[in-house]
Amino acid sequence: DAGVIQSPRHEVTEMGQEVTLRCKPISGHNSLFWYRQTMMRGLELLIYFNNNVPIDDSGMPEDRFSAKMPNASFSTLKIQPSEPRDSAVYFCASTLRGGLDTQYFGPGTRLTVL
Amino acid sequence: GQQVMQIPQYQHVQEGEDFTTYCNSSTTLSNIQWYKQRPGGHPVFLIQLVKSGEVKKQKRLTFQFGEAKKNSSLHITATQTTDVGTYFCAEEYGNKLVFGAGTILRVKS
C-alpha cells in the first residue's frame, strides 16, 4: 500500500491567497484526520471524518478554515484567506476504524504564508 | 480540554546513554499510544499499551503503563544516533486521540 498521500509537499503563498491541501487516505480506512503542527502549539487536531462525515471540527481555528471529504479516497483542507500565522506543517492521517485506532500519517504539507 | 503532560520537553544525551520520557494524565486511561517523529518526518506509530502495569519491549525500547493507568513511560537503552526525533504519547479523549507535546531527543556521537 502507498500509505497516506498528501499534496503538495510544500506550499509558499502570499497573505490573502486561497490555499488548498489535499489528502488521499489508505484504501479501506474509514476515518481521516487533519492535524496542524507548529513549534508553539505542537500537534493539534483540526477535524476528523468518519465514513466521509465530519465528526469533530472543534479544532478548526476559525471560519477561514474548511474541510471536505467528498468520497472515501479524497479530502481537502482549504484556507481562505490565508494569513502568516497559518504557516505550519499540516498532516493528514487515516485509521482503519475510528478515532481511537492506530493513526497512519501522511508526509505532511509544509505551508508558508508570506 | 484534556491535556497530556509529557516530560521532559527536550533531552540531549551522549550516544550510549539511556533515555526516558514520561506521560502523565489527570484521568485513568483505557489505553495509551506512542509515536516517533524523525526530524523533517511524520509521526509513526510505535506501540499501544492497554493493560494495567503492562510492559512491552521493542529491541532497545521499553514501554510501560502504570498500575493505575494514569501514566506511561518510554525508555531507550544505549541510545544510538538513529533514535533522534520527537517521541509523542497519545491518549483517548472522547472519540479521538490527544497528543502530548512530545519529547525531543538529540544524541551526540
Image: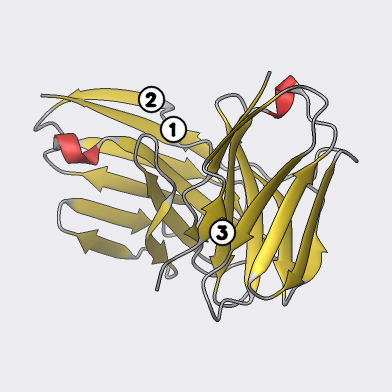
Mark nearer the viewer, 1 or 2: 2
Q: Which mark is residue B82?
A: none
Q: CA distance from mark 1 to mark 2?
A: 8 Å
Identified at 45% across, 44% down, the residue is: B88
Q: Is residue A42 visible?
A: no
Label 2 environment density (alpha carbons within 10 Å; few <14, some 14–19, many ≥20): few
Please determine if labels 1 and 2 lie on a single subunit: yes
Q: Chain of mark 3?
A: A
Q: Which residue is mark 3?
A: A93
Image quadrant where one finds the C terminus of chain B = top left
Label 3 environment density (alpha carbons within 10 Å; few <14, some 14–19, many ≥20): many
Identified at 65% across, 58% down, the residue is: A33
Q: In this picture, is B20 found above or below A24? A: above
Three-letter amino acid code at the position of disc 3: Ala
Identified at 42% across, 70% down, the residue is: B51
> Residue reaching furthest right?
A63
Three-letter amino acid code at the position of disc 1: Ile
Please determine if labels 1 and 3 lie on a single subunit: no
Please determine if labels 3 and 2 lie on a single subunit: no
Q: Which mark is residue B7?
A: 1
Q: CA distance from mark 3 to mark 2?
A: 25 Å
Three-letter amino acid code at the position of disc 2: Tyr
Q: In this picture, is B10 found above or below A61? A: above
Q: Which mark is residue B10?
A: 2
Do the numbered discs 1 and 3 sit on residues whose CB atoms are within 8 Å?
Answer: no
Helix, strand or loop at disc 1?
strand
Q: Chain of mark 2?
A: B
